[in-house]
């Protein structure tokens, strides 16, 4: 199976302090995994490294055929990233945000709006409106990999049904089995 | 990828309601300054106001929004889009003053007009790099932008040929935009 998202020995150091210890993961289409980190900040940074938003101090991130450091724009196009804080805007702001994404991603706004509505409706019972909207925005373009920053429990199962071909990576700070499962089905865990 | 579509979308997003209020305030103050013929009586005050307004225009752009960093764009593309907004907002004040002066039959000499617009644009571009820094570094960029604007105006007033200080302004603007693009490309949004 072709690897969609590969993180190799990615480590993040800031001001001489190691915030994220080296971690590696490779996910093919339809696969999913959780990266467990010791604290919230490390979980946040690890998710952003995997989503090609933060550059690791050493190591590499490859999304599809694109190395995130060399071709960040192409790599980011293939990743849907959902921040833990969700989308803190009302319906009008969501509509504006969908139009913004349609322009920046160079896609059809009506298609994006329809995709976002489907995702919002599917997530309504499971997540807060803010989180559902953030997921809807991330999944509105056709992405090959989804990266969730500390998602609420049960979200991943819905996303798998919505985007069965996408690789799904999430980060958390505790073992899912011990503290409310991020995934209710078996997952590959990367424990440091 | 349609670069123009993305650039305009980012520029539109940069113009939040608070930015529009700030632009309105600058225009209003510009009208007041021009109404009292301050550009004739005390041009230094008008230049200082334009440079200060341009610095604020560069610093108030919210470039750290996470959405910008998740977008499939290179740092230079993001930088161009933010720079478009910053320079447009920065020239609001001088444009108002020049227009009001023109309407009141007291048109500025064209080198003064060019110097004001050039310095406002350069100041905004230099100040943009301050948006990605904090504390002393951000204050340093604000001071640098004020100094760059003051230097261009000073050269223009010193009687040097227009092409010489205009070329310097263009070079400074290019270097500032380039530096901002590099900073954006290297920036890691951790918050």
Image (spheres, coloured by chain):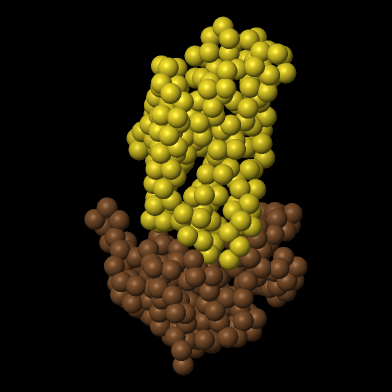
Q: Is residue A28 above or below residue B81?
A: below
Residue at image location 38% in from the left, 56% down from the top? B186
What percent of the width, then of the height, locates residue A11? 31, 68
Picture colour for chain B: yellow
Instruction: Name the quarter where the N terminus of chain B is drawn.
Output: bottom right
Can you tell which quarter of the image residue A121 is in?
bottom right
Q: Which chain is depicted brown?
A: A
Residue at image location 53% in from the left, 74% down from the top? A78
On the rendered structure, is A95 left or right of A6? right
Q: Is residue A112 above or below residue A100?
A: below
Q: Is residue A17 above or below residue B41?
A: below
Residue B30 seen:
no
Residue B118 seen:
yes
Residue at image location 63% in from the left, 22% down from the top? B98
What percent of the width, then of the height, locates residue B164? 41, 29
Can you tell which quarter of the image residue A119 is in?
bottom right
Give the tally of numbered discs.
Answer: 0
On the rendered structure, is A102 left or right of A1? right
Q: Is residue A87 above or below residue A150?
A: above
What percent of the width, then of the height, locates residue A175? 42, 76
Residue at image location 33% in from the left, 77% down from the top? A8
Residue in the foreground of this view, choosing between B45 and B23: B45
What percent of the width, then of the height, locates residue A89? 66, 54
| Residue that lies at the very extreme toward the top in this rendered image | B41
On the rendered structure, is B17 left or right of A69? right
């Amino acid at each position: 199976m072709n690897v969609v998202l590969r993180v190799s020995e990615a480590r993040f150091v800031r001001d001489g302090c190691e915030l994220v210890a080296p971690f590696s993961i490779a996910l093919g289409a339809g696969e999913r995994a959780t990266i467990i980190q010791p604290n919230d900040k490390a979980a946040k940074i690890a998710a952003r490294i995997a989503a090609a938003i933060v550059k690791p101090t050493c190591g590499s991130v490859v999304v599809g055929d694109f190395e995130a450091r060399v071709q960040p724009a192409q790599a980011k196009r293939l990743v849907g990233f959902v921040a833990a804080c969700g989308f803190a805007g009302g319906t009008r702001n969501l509509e504006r945000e969908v139009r913004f994404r349609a322009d920046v991603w160079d896609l059809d706004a009506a298609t994006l709006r329809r995709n976002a509505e489907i995702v919002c409706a599917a997530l309504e019972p499971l997540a807060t409106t803010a989180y559902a909207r953030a997921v809807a925005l991330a999944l509105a373009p056709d992405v090959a990999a989804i990266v969730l920053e500390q998602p609420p429990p049960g979200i991943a199962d819905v996303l798998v049904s919505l985007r069965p071909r996408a690789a799904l990576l999430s980060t958390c700070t505790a073992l899912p089995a011990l503290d409310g499962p991020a995934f209710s089905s078996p997952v590959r865990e990367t424990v440091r | 990828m349609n670069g123009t579509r993305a650039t305009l979308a980012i520029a539109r997003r940069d113009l939040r309601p608070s930015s529009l209020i700030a632009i309105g305030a600058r225009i209003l103050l510009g009208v007041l300054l021009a109404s009292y013929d301050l550009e004739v009586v005390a041009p230094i005050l008008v230049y200082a106001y334009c440079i200060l307004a341009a610095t604020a225009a560069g610093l108030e752009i919210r470039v750290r929004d996470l959405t910008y960093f998740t977008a499939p764009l290179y740092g230079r593309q993001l930088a161009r889009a933010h720079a478009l907004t910053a320079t447009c907002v920065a020239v609001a004040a001088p444009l108002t003053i020049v227009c009001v002066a023109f309407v009141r039959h007291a048109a500025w000499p064209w080198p003064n007009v060019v110097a004001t617009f050039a310095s406002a644009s350069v100041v905004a571009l230099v100040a943009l790099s301050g948006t990605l820094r904090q504390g002393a570094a951000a204050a340093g960029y604000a001071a640098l932008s004020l100094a760059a604007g003051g230097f261009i105006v000073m050269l223009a007033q010193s009687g040097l040929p227009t092409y010489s200080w205009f070329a310097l302004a263009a070079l400074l603007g290019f270097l500032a935009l380039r530096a901002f693009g590099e900073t954006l490309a290297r920036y890691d949004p951790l918050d």
